[in-house]
Structure formats: structure tokens, C-alpha cells
Image: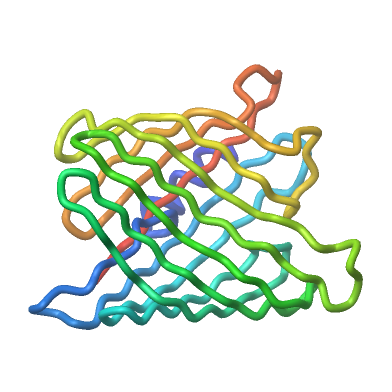
Amino acid sequence: MRLVAALTIAALGLGTAARAQSTDENPWAYSISGTAYILPDDDDYFQPTFTVDHDWLHLEARHNYEAFETGSVWGGYNFSVGEAVTFEGTAMAGVVFGATDGVAPGYKASVSWTKLEFYSEGEYVFDTNDSAGNFFYSWTQLTWELSDWSRIGLVGQRTKVYDSDRDIQRGFIVGFSSERVDFTASLFNPDERQPTFVIGLGVSF
């Protein structure tokens, strides 16, 4: 039932989206996205993200990313290089507040070649209340484009928003996208009796 509920949420427009890119026709690009986590031994939760891009400028706000009931705001610099093999990156710095307080350098980066894409985002949070709370968070995926609208691949994450016996969780991801909408479904720890499901949907405009 929880999975059905998460899919319903995703269908309403909540989930993970690819970062919107600025174009000559629309120099300001926006995206709203979120991720529904369906956990075997903890409370399910939802993680929304909002981004704004304008040429090199990247602005972002997140909730429930670094910790539950915790927000963060970011500023960053976009850049890209390459043609046959393309690299797109964003160097960021953020402020974290709520259940966890701190500052964080971060990044987003993708490398694409023909139908293959490697994507990673990460941050290192310096907890200003307790240095024992310092932690590196990351989400990384390697996908192969099956068609103009679908892809499949491997995914890994490192987080402490919820408890897990594994420092790095690994699994599989499938994605479906149109011009402005992107849907993903990930299965982490498939070898466990009760794996973790992550459902995402996002819209760019």
C-alpha cells in the first residue's frame, strides 16, 4: 500500500527531475521535483527540491535531504565543456538549517557519451553544532538510453536521513522522460528481504 501511495504522489507531480538548463529563448529555467522514499524499517518520507538557473547562476532549495525536518539553500556556478563527450557541472555552496545546522560545499556533475550518461551529486556537511555530525552525502547513477524517452542503469547513494546497515546503498534505476517531465524509479539493496524503493517525478519550465 505504501508503494501505491508513493506512486500516486509521483503521478501528481512529486519526484526527482533532471536539472533544467537555460536556453536562448528562455534565459531563466526552473524545476520543481521531489523524491518519495519507501523504507522497510523506518517512516516513509518525501524530499522536495526547487532549482533556478540563469546562464552560469544556479540557485537551489532542498528539504529532508541532509536530515529529516532539515532545509538547505544553495548558490552555484554552472559550466559545460565538450562535444562528442560532454561534461556539465555545477560547483555549489550551501547553508543547512533545522534538525541539522551547518554549511556545505557541494557539486552536480554529468558526463555523457552517445547513449551512456554518468551523473553524480554530492555535498559535505560541516555540522556547526557537533563535528561528529559531519557527513558526505551523495547520489550517483550510470544509465544507458534505451530510447528517446527511456533509460535504465545502476544507482548508489550515501545518506544518513534514515538508518541503514550499509554505508553505501546500491541498486537499479529506470527512467522515463518527455520534454519537461522526468520520472524515475529506483530499487536499493535488492538482495535484502525488504529493499528500499525511491520514486521520483519532476517538472521543468
Given residues 121 and 77, the one toward you in this image is 77
- Rendered location of residue 184, percent (x, y): 39, 43
- For the C terminus, give its image quadrant: bottom left
- Rendered location of residue 40, percent (x, y): 71, 34
Q: What colour scheme has been applied to the protein in the rendered image?
A: rainbow
Image-quadrant location for residue 106: bottom right
The number of callouts visible is: 0
Q: Is residue 80 above or below residue 8?
A: below
Q: Residue at x 28, y 63 (%)?
A: 80
Q: Residue at x 53, y 31 (%)?
A: 187
Direction left: furthest residue:
25
- For the N terminus, give its image quadrant: top right
Image-quadrant location for residue 185: top left
In the image, 128: left or right of 33? right
Q: Is residue 145 above or below residue 182?
A: above
In the image, 6: left or right of 54? right
Image-quadrant location for residue 14: bottom left
Q: Residue at x 81, y 33 (%)?
A: 165
Given residues 123 and 44, the one toward you in this image is 123
- Rendered location of residue 117, percent (x, y): 32, 40
Q: Residue at x 47, y 59 (%)?
A: 34
Q: Is residue 51 above or below residue 178?
A: below
Direction front: furthest residue:
82
- Rendered location of residue 199, percent (x, y): 48, 44
